[in-house]
Amino acid sequence: MKNYEFTELTIGQEADFKHTFTAEDMAQFSKLTGDFNPLHADEEYAKSTEFGGLVVHGMLVGSLFSTLVGMYLPGKYCLFLSLEMQFHNPVKPNQEVKVHGEIVNKINSLKILEIKAKIIDKDNKILIPALIKVKVLK
């Protein structure tokens, strides 16, 4: 976990990490949220759709933005304020994705960062673009 203080952070600063969601992750997310939509939980149904198989819950994939800001940029002193994201392309179980974030604005008087973020596949195809706002507590 990073522990950047607000004064240490700069516009253009970046961070990234990789993650892979398993079928077990999806089952646990379904159990926690009650979202048992067959696109995420029924292989036979999912095969009959345009996706050709199971798709990881969009909100489960989007939760990686929490990891980005809470662990990497800025890390320990982060308070998540807002997230705007769009689901452009699905993520399949066992598909490795990369999460990337870059600080694009600092509001010094409020200690707020705006972070342009994205989740991409191995071919750099954007799966979920996002704009995140966080407050840095220290």
Image: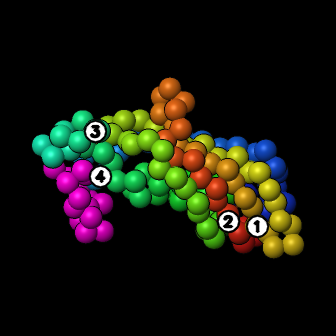
Q: Which residue is mark 2?
A: 134
Q: Secondary structure at mark 3?
A: loop
* Relative to 18, 45 lies left or right: left
Residue at 12% x, 43% y: name it.
44
Q: Main secondary structure of the magenta part?
A: helix
Q: Which residue is mark 3?
A: 50
Q: Is residue 31 magenta?
A: yes
Q: Which residue is mark 4?
A: 25
The disc label shown at residue 112, or none: 1
Label 3, label 1: how far apart the Cα atoms are: 40 Å
Picture quadrant of residue 14: top right
Closer to us: 59 or 29:
59
Badge 2: how crowded within 10 Å, few (<14), some, or many (20+)?
many
Of the two numbered discs 2 and 4 on the same chain, state the one appearing first in sequence.
4
Residue at 36% x, 35% y: name it.
95
Of the two numbered discs 1 and 2 on the same chain, state the one appearing first in sequence.
1
Residue at 30% x, 45% y: name it.
55
Asked if the residue under mark 2 is in contact with the one under mark 1, i.e. CB atoms within 8 Å, the reply is yes
The disc label shown at residue 72, or none: none
Image spot of residue 116 (x, y percent):
67, 50
Q: Which residues are magenta?
A: 27-42
Of the two numbered discs 3 and 1 on the same chain, state the one appearing first in sequence.
3
Outermost residue toward the left in this view:
44
Label 4, label 3: how far apart the Cα atoms are: 23 Å
Badge 4: how crowded within 10 Å, few (<14), some, or many (20+)?
some
Question: Of discs 3 and 1, which sits in the foreground?
Answer: 3
Label 1, label 4: how far apart the Cα atoms are: 32 Å
Closer to us: 122 or 87:
87
Badge 3: how crowded within 10 Å, few (<14), some, or many (20+)?
few
